[in-house]
Amino acid sequence: MRKELNKLLRVRQHPFLTNIINVSLCPLFLVLELAERGALTEILSSPKLLDRIVLFQTAYQVADALRFLHGIDVIYRDLKPENVLVWSLEEHADLHVKLIDFLHGFATGLISCAGSPGNHAPEMLESANKEEYTFQVDVYSYAILLYRIITRLIPFIGYDLGAKINAAVIAGERPQWKHVPVATFGFPTLTEIML
């Protein structure tokens, strides 16, 4: 428990992780910072398009928070728009987002399958309650989050149950890009970059 508390104290030092303001043990609850803009889910479901720079900065800030967590042996395991709180959508702001709900990942070599369907990495699903997995599971979840940020589409929307989504991920299916108008969101196509 002491090791976990030391990690919690280190988390307070990172600008893109939500600070824990207070803890109550009986009843158990945490008091966190207030993000007046809400979760990234709400922003992505809005019809208003975000500036390309804000999208890049958001992606960077999430990646930097993951890098920090991995550096203190925390596997996030449940990266999704609902766990990314938004502080600002202004292009020149220093802070756009902070991660929440990272407390269940205070160990490496985990075997449980915490998280949300569609965001789980294949190796996490395949090894559920059998083998250990590593920080690589967060890379998959980060890629799914980038898909959501860029396209504003929910991956695996054609599946109606979490079990079907999980089976599709294990089988190697990934979100589809072929009908996504990428240029609409300010990201050039690969062809445009090469020219």
Image (cartoon, rainbow, N blue to C red):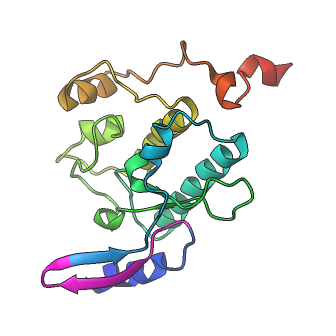
The furthest residue to the right: 195
Location of the N terminus (image quadrant): bottom left
How many numbered marks appear? 0
Using the image as rendered, state which of residue 170 and residue 44 is in the foreground: 44
Which residue is pictured at 34% across the width and 23% down the height?
A: 157
Q: Is residue 188 visible?
A: yes
Examine the image and state in which quarter residue 173 appears.
Answer: top left
The answer to whether residue 1 is magenta is no
Q: Is residue 142 visible?
A: no
124 versus 182 height, above or below:
below
Instruction: Return the x and y of residue 138 as percentages of the image width and height.
Output: 43, 48
Instruction: Return the x and y of residue 164 as percentages of the image width and height.
Output: 22, 24
Instruction: Return the x and y of residue 179 as percentages of the image width and height.
Output: 54, 13
Q: Relative to 112, is 59 on the left or the right?
A: right
Which residue is pictured at 61% across the width and 18% down the height?
A: 181
Instruction: Return the x and y of residue 78 as percentages of the image width and height.
Output: 34, 50
Q: Relative to 86, is 83 on the left or the right?
A: left
Location of the C terminus (image quadrant): top right
Using the image as rendered, state which of residue 128 and residue 25 is in the foreground: 25
The furthest residue to the left: 26
Which residue is pictured at 24% across the width and 50% down the height?
A: 114
92 versus 163 height, above or below:
below
Q: Relative to 181, is 70 on the left or the right?
A: left
Examine the image and state in which quarter residue 174 appears.
Answer: top left
Which residue is pictured at 37% across the width and 22% down the height?
A: 172
Point out the stretch of residues depicted in magenta: 16-28
